[in-house]
Amino acid sequence: MNKNDFSTALLVDQTPEEVFNAVTNVRGWWSGLFAESFEGNTEKLHDEFSFYAGEGAHYSKQKLVEVVPNEKVVWLVTDGALTFVEKQDEWIGTKVIFNIAKKGDKTQLIFTHEGLTPEIECYDSCAPAWTQYVQTKLLSLITGNNQ
């Protein structure tokens, strides 16, 4: 990982298992901000899913390449088209990583999009979008405080 890779973290009262279950319920949190749709599965090693958002402004296909129950989930972006930037395939080959760990009586989730760095064109749009999804939608799913 590069120290410039986009990252954000949550600290919650829920167990690592509850956090893991929310992370792998991608339809439950990576939705609602744009018109989007999903295809595929998001829970087990080698599952693949596609995400479409913004009426064609964003498409990405992910494969789960690492799944350690209650500890870690890694998606490899295998295809994509970001129509709002010149280099539409910027995400291809990047990884989306969810590290889950017990911290005292709380659980920490560290979200990192490895390869999403300030040097690439979509960073200024994608980093705030990830922050919104993780800090609001995923957090709400984890805590049961649906917004």
Image (cartoon, rainbow, N blue to C red):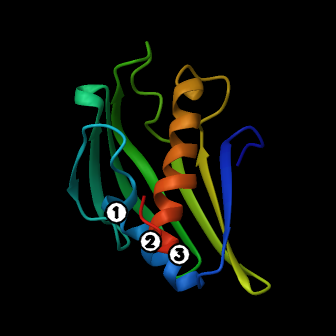
What is the spatial separation of the Cα atoms under label 2 and label 3, in whole angstroms?
5 Å
Q: Mark 1, residues whose alpha carbon is within 10 Å: few (<14), some, or many (≥20)?
A: some
**Image quarter of the C terminus:** bottom left
Q: Who comes first in sequence, dot 1 or dot 2?
A: 2
Q: Position of residue 105 (x, y in %)?
A: 75, 87
Q: Amino acid at mark 3?
A: Val
15 and 146: which is toward the camera: 146
Q: Amino acid at mark 2?
A: Ala
Q: Position of residue 12 (x, y in %)?
A: 65, 73
Residue 66, label in figure:
none
What is the spatial separation of the Cα atoms under label 1 and label 2, in whole angstroms?
7 Å
Q: Amino acid at mark 1?
A: Gly
| Element type where label 3 sits in the image | helix
What is the spatial separation of the Cα atoms under label 1 and label 3, in whole angstroms?
12 Å
Circles 2 and 3, Cβ within 8 Å, touching? The answer is yes
Q: Position of residue 58 (x, y in %)?
A: 33, 31
57 lies left or right of 91 = left
Task: Please name the residue that numbered disc 2 is placed on.
Answer: 22
Task: Please name the residue that numbered disc 1 is placed on.
Answer: 28
Task: Please name the residue that numbered disc 3 is placed on.
Answer: 19
